[in-house]
Amino acid sequence: MAKEETYYQYLERRGVSRRDFLKFCTVMAASLGLSAGSVPKIAEALETKKRIPVIWRHLVECTCCTESFIRSHHPIAADILLNMISLDYDETLMVAAGERAEEAARKSMEENKGNYILAVEGAVSTKDGGIYCVLGGRSSVEILKEEAKNAKAIIAWGSCAVNGCIAAANPNPSGSVPVQEIIKDKPIINVPGCPPIAEVMAGVITHLLTFDRLPELDREGRPKAFYGHRIHDKCNRRAYFDAGMFVESFDDEGAKQGWCLYKVGCKGPNTYNSCANMQWNGGVSYDIKSGHPCIGCSEKGFWDNTGGESFYTHLAEVPGMHIGMNVDKFGVAAVGAAAVGAAVHAGFSAFTKKAQDKAAKGGSDKDSLGG
Amino acid sequence: MAERIVVDPVTRIEGHLRVEAKVEGGKIVDAVSAGTMIRGLEIILRDRDPRDAWALVQRICGVCTTIHALASVRSVEDALKIRIPKNAELIRNIMFTALYVHDHVVHFYHLHAPDWVDIPNALKADPAATAQLAQSISRWPKSTAGYFKDVQTKLKTFVDSGQLGIFANAYWGHPAYKLPPEANLMAVAHYLEALSWQKEIVKIHTIFGGKNPHPNYVVGGMTAPIDINSDNAVNIERFNMIGKLIDEAMEFVEQVYVPDLLAIASFYKDSAAYGGGVGNFLCYGDLPTTHINDPSGFLFPRGVILNKNLGEVLDVDPRDPEQILEYTDHSWYKNSKSGLHPWEGETNINYTGPKPPYKTLDESGAFNQAYSWLKSPRWREKSVEVGPLARMLVAYAKKDCKAHDLVKSEVDKVLGGLGVGPEALFSTLGRTAARGIETKLCATWLKQFFNELVANVKNGDQTTFNKERWEPSTWEKDCKGVGIAEAPRGALGHWSHIQNGKIANYQCVVPTTWNGSPKDHKNQRGAIEAALIGTPLAKPEEPVELLRTIHSFDPCLACAAHLTDTENQEITTIDVLR
């Protein structure tokens, strides 16, 4: 009955204590934005469920998502990422090569029909019959369609799979498109970012295993727990934005004091991601904290969103705040503007939430893994 | 009779690699390699702001992450005549050496070791004997019988589950695996330890660049400000953290990686007899101790070695229009001319291969036509190898270079330890050993650069960014730059041409374009193709030795490579696409 082994039994045999296991469940609940009351539920699910078979495909990509994935940080999370799932195919990590590797993917698809997760890293090249990305003699479009067919759900890892990212940047020479443009009849979890944060990736997988359904998604198919807030909303430099204190040039006095990077091009106000609250590589830092403006890598079309201007050109305006027109003089009226801004921002968030709830409700059948 | 085999995908690399080879008498007698994926980043870069280029080209690769960003900012700074502050140069060197230590360790344990380590065979090991073996080669404190027993139990549970995951369907039990069970068990334990350790060293990138992979750079220096007295800058707490990460990295490299490498290599001395390849080696050099335009101060020296002749090191000049040219005779491009210097380089995509799904890129097996997205860069019309072996050989041969004595002593130590002569370096084994040697050097240099940064800050210099030429109004209307870097996988160059504040042309010649290139205008093979020829295969249907030679280059393609038979029309179904 080895195949029926649960995840907890597996961990137990690997020497993980009950105490560490529960600690992990608590951290997972917190990172998923769930209440403490859900901890027993996560624990129960992990104690009673099998490891999920995962086929992880690399299409038009640079492997940064996999690299991020293996950096997952919570003490036992790294262990779990390799072991809570049965990673039956992954070009970067698997030992088998060539036809033997492809056979492993086919075998997993057959044995786990309707029950495996297809994880896609990279965009899909569609132009000229898909000749710009051919793997094992087959086009990436053909592979994606075949493997999506009997998948339980699809995870689109990273901005390439979610919105095309660098491959689809103007003029998109390879005709690359996101997964959701090819696959229309399967639940897809979009996990954008170039790359996504490791713990976000771990959280998505934990959610699938624990609740056997998709996490709550927003209108763009992103898990709300991780993409529900703008980086700006949780930014460690936010107080300086509100106070009108801006870095004018890298390494100036403001930069050293941690002032706001808005004027050197920060896209935090337009970017939905968890960088500011979860941070990177075990919570050490993130772009803005280290002194570089956010380039908005989890947003659709971010390579082209500046309209031909450099990334270091400041945003024309901040959604919910009317400061763009006079940013250079903004500091003067900082206090008043911040108060107005906060009020407008509150209204904006409420509106967004309503719209997202509506979208989520409409798509609830589609979101169910069981169906 | 010759047998034609295809390996696609070659796994455990970055990108997608396709290989076809002709095997006769138990050896590979012919081979070609080709890339089968392209995004056209050089095209995407056109008309963009040169200050943004680093972020776009960084996405060439998420594995050797940051090195493209580094080559890019150097290229643009060269074009715009920007000199970066000393601290920025030191921080870049710190990020560079941290990248090497991370990348090489991950390559060894997670991408390369499974070619040499029979993982299920570790179940047969005696944990006490494994502990004895481990203790005989290093003082790593975890090496106890109980620890290895525990690892073995975990492995047994995993194998018994029937869900082998990433270890499924491999060539386990193949006669080319030669390690005793104890060595296999030791390697399995360290595979897991390395996976856990690797996430730590990258925090150095997170501190200076905000995240890893894809940390941030900036034209003109670095954006992380240094201020010992600010809680929002690189301060004393951050310096402490970096110091600790470096000490742990040095310990891991010296107590785990290098001893494991030598122990495993001692069972595979036969792999010192093949895989040498073209015998020409090129390095641009890197790790400036003064500044990037002063190659005499590089720790990795610049130079070219031809025909394995360690008696002479030739000069390289990436600006010379006669030296580095890219040929496209066997590549899917329609450029105005084959053989262009990157400053004049073109990327005019023109696919002429078969329509997928296909069994081979050339039914005839002759491969006289285009068969790859990779171009064929050549140095003075010669095919060269780049990477760790090239770097160690050039430093070994170039007696007047800064790191010669240190490199020579480390190389001689390894050769002595294995009981082989310098000729063993020109091989699959030599390439893997060179990677380990330079990792040890890089860990040492990482510490030195860090100490130097601390000393410089202590002396009152906290500057990390030069803003003098940040504004496009200060730029020349028409200028060209070149940014070189020694990526973990070898010589990397980014050539930029800036007109009216925008990128007019941008060409990257990356390490795997050198190593994995298709045949050129003279039908000379790239380094990987050449190295495969002569590689013995005990069981052609399970070509693990072929994987060893390819992985010894640590290829990094967002593409595919591909080797093929030139005569036999029958393609076997071994590792072949139906």
Image (cartoon, rainbow, N blue to C red):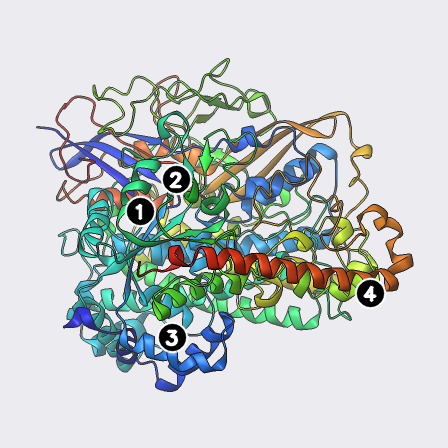
Q: Is residue A86 above or below residue B273?
A: below
Q: Are marks 3 and 2 on the same chain?
A: no
Q: Which corner quadrant of the image does residue B311 belong to?
A: top left
Mark 4, Cα crowd under 10 Å, few <14 / some 14-19 / many 20+, is few
Of the numbered discs in the image, which one, if any, rests on residue A169?
A: none
- The residue that disc 2 covers is A182
Q: Residue furthest right?
A: A332
Front residue of this view, candidates A359 and B453 = A359
Residue at disc 1, secondary structure: helix
Mark 3, Cα crowd under 10 Å, few <14 / some 14-19 / many 20+, is few
| Amino acid, disc 1 | Ala
Tell me the CA gap for discs 1 and 4. 49 Å
Tell me the CA gap for discs 3 and 2. 54 Å
Residue at disc 4, secondary structure: helix
Label pair 1/2, CB-CB below 8 angstroms: yes
- The residue that disc 1 covers is A148
Label pair 3/1, CB-CB below 8 angstroms: no
